[in-house]
Image: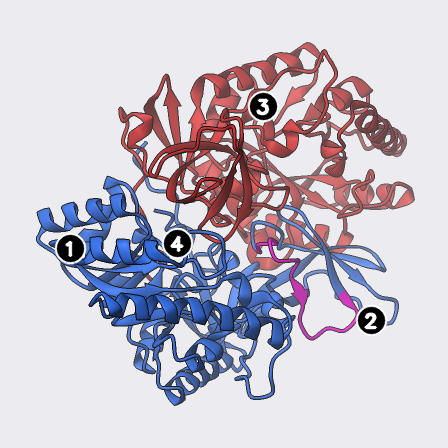
Chain colours: A blue, B red
């Protein structure tokens, strides 16, 4: 024991053509990706709020650095170990949009505050005391935001007096700084219609605004009120309640987000992330089987979709296989032929891979390590 | 570029207690695991067939070596890269229970035949020609089994004359050896009732037997007729059609397999694999949130289940969170307290982790690398 898990080489070399990439592989269309990064930076700048994209989607410091170069103030992470990978990759301002509980994890988080600005959420006074004790002993300062439950029903303090009580605890802690509110409504991102999303965010923003004002009233200024995702960020930005947004999936997009209906003035993020798969079996005229199943694409939000090949449908995923139904009118792919799939849900799909194979005009331009793949802690 | 993805240290050290394991972590109950390995070896031996367990479930050479020490003739893998990890870990007899298509993959597979016995499936004469060409050039011999579709509707030759035609192609190839039939019925494993599973395997076995006899009739002897999983292996073993079985999940079990009903004489495999998670938020009397979501447990076959804590139910998984509903009668876990979860589906859950934390009587006895985690190629 003690050996690290065996590393596999990347599925392509730079300069290779699409046909030379070993499959299954996560392929990033760099032109589309760069347009997505620019569109988001522009849209957020025009609304006068800060952009701190969520790195839980990409887990890739190369992407984080490009987001920051385009104007982002830093990144969000979900785990201390994810933050570690981002900071190791050069990021210097990280908000962990999650509670960090337990001595081992808090030590890990506080260690990062020696080399980067580190902020974290809290929804419990005992956790605040632990954060403070570790930060004090290590001689670092942690910024702490209150997580407010604005409708997600997951973590967070419910709107009301609990917010003020927790704000006082944070503000009174010696090695912590009260830094604001986290008011993220996750499930709102995937409501299909723009009106449903608007209604959810109007409610979330009114809770956030009320909490911010109440905290103001006891002398606790919210430097940051953050939330939002790819499905709603313009709503939070326009609400008057938020001054920072944290969309993540917009760099890639996925089949689930592509099922949303968008207002006409919503930025058109393009599908930039694909799962390249090969036909490994062509046993019948109406069926082929590709080499990408559950271990290459997360199916929690639906099956992958076949890109740009009318009449093909990915109908069944098993661990290492994807069954593709071929309609009678479609040209059936041949044995060994490649398909581009659009993942159902980008975040957990990226977490299954070690490499992003970055492609421009049919050539592999770069290989970016998904450095925080498997960063569970 | 060219850096490998950042490696994270294991979530525990040997000698640590359960409370010191960082979460989320995959925990293996060694006593239960060893009983499962012994029970399977004994059950298969009593039926007079060979055992070649499937390593796609565990991806861990330490487990493969223990299975082989208990009598298994080798392991099955699903991918050439998975076989590579097993052979690097000391296994010397591997059957890739899958088609391996495309030059890069076939080169990888053939390279392994220099140091281990390597067998692979085929369902297409063009693929057989590619396998033969690469094996000939490299001066190795590959054993090739025909994949027969016995009801799964995935890969494989349909029962009938196609089997004989493909058998002749394999037998006529200079650097390949015709080695038999692969007749696996995957979906039968999870039919809930023993009678349904029996009916499915009776049909599969009759196809396998007919194909074996037809091949015999043209002078092609099936050294191996293999198939079966944890849900059905005794049925294949008793059928007279199969002489090798390839169950995988029995070493771990999972919530999905635990929903099967079993005949009284079926070996009682125990749940040995758990996902250890911590309560990271306790925001309401009827709800706590644990630090294990979609990126720590695959939900393709249902959500994880809470182990040995009546009144707690894992009701919602998001990327990094699991929402646990606490019934009014139950003791609610406190902030930081640990839960053991039973994964919904063991294979893709194991593939999310780099380490198995092996525990006996509450202490970490070993840390086994999941060396083929992410072996997609």
Q: Are marks 2 and 4 in contact (CB under 8 Å)?
A: no
- The part of the chain drawn in magenta is A297-312
User: Viewer-proximal residue, B165 or A17?
Assistant: A17
Q: Residue at x 65, y 30 (%)?
A: B257
Q: Earlier in the sequence, mark 1 or mark 4?
A: 4
Task: Give the structural element (helix, strand or loop) at label 3.
Answer: loop
Between the residue at mark 2 and the residue at mark 3, the CA separation in whole angstroms equals: 44 Å
Q: Chain of mark 1?
A: A
Q: Position of residue A206 (x, y in %)?
A: 44, 71
Main SS, magenta residues: loop
Q: Residue tagged by mark 2?
A: A330
Mark 3 or 4, closer to the camera: 4
Image position of A98 (left or right of A282)? left
Q: Quadrant of residue B5?
A: bottom left
Q: Residue tagged by mark 4?
A: A156
Between the residue at mark 2 and the residue at mark 4, the CA separation in whole angstroms equals: 50 Å
Disc sitting over residue A172 in the figure: 1
> Are dots 2 and 3 on a single chain?
no
Disc sitting over residue A234 in the figure: none
């Amino acid at each position: 024991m003690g050996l690290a898990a065996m590393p596999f080489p990347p599925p392509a070399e730079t300069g290779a053509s699409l046909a030379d990439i070993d499959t299954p592989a996560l392929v990033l269309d760099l032109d589309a990706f760069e347009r997505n990064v620019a569109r988001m930076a522009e849209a957020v700048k025009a609304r006068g709020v800060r952009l701190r994209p969520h790195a839980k989607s990409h887990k890739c410091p190369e992407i984080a650095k490009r987001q920051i170069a385009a104007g982002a103030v830093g990144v969000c992470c979900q785990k201390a170990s994810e933050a570690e990978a981002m900071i190791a990759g050069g990021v210097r301002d990280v908000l962990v949009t999650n509670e960090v509980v337990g001595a081992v994890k808090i030590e890990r988080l506080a260690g990062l505050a020696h080399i980067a600005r580190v902020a974290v959420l809290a929804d419990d006074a005992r956790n605040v005391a632990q954060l403070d004790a570790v930060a004090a002993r290590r001689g670092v300062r942690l910024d702490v935001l209150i997580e407010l439950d604005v409708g997600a029903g997951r973590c967070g303090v419910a709107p009301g007096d609990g917010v003020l009580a927790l704000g006082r605890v944070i503000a009174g802690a010696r090695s912590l700084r009260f830094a604001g509110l986290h008011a993220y409504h996750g499930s709102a991102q995937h409501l299909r219609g723009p009106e449903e999303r608007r209604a959810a965010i109007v409610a979330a923003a009114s809770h956030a605004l009320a909490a911010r004002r109440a905290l103001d009233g006891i002398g606790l200024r919210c430097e940051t009120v953050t939330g939002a995702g790819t499905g709603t960020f313009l709503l939070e930005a326009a609400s008057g309640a938020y001054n920072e947004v944290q969309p993540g999936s917009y760099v890639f997009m996925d089949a689930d987000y592509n099922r949303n209906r968008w207002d006409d003035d919503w930025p058109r993020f393009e599908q930039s992330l694909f799962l390249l798969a090969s036909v490994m079996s062509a046993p019948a005229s109406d069926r082929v089987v590709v080499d990408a199943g559950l271990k290459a694409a997360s199916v929690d939000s639906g099956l992958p979709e076949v890109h740009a090949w009318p009449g093909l449908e990915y109908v069944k995923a098993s661990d290492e296989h994807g069954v593709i139904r071929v309609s009678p009118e479609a040209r059936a792919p041949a044995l060994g032929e490649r398909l581009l799939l659009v993942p159902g849900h980008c975040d957990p799909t990226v977490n299954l891979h070690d490499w992003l194979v970055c492609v421009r005009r049919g050539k592999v331009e770069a290989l970016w390590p998904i450095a925080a793949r498997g960063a569970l802690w």
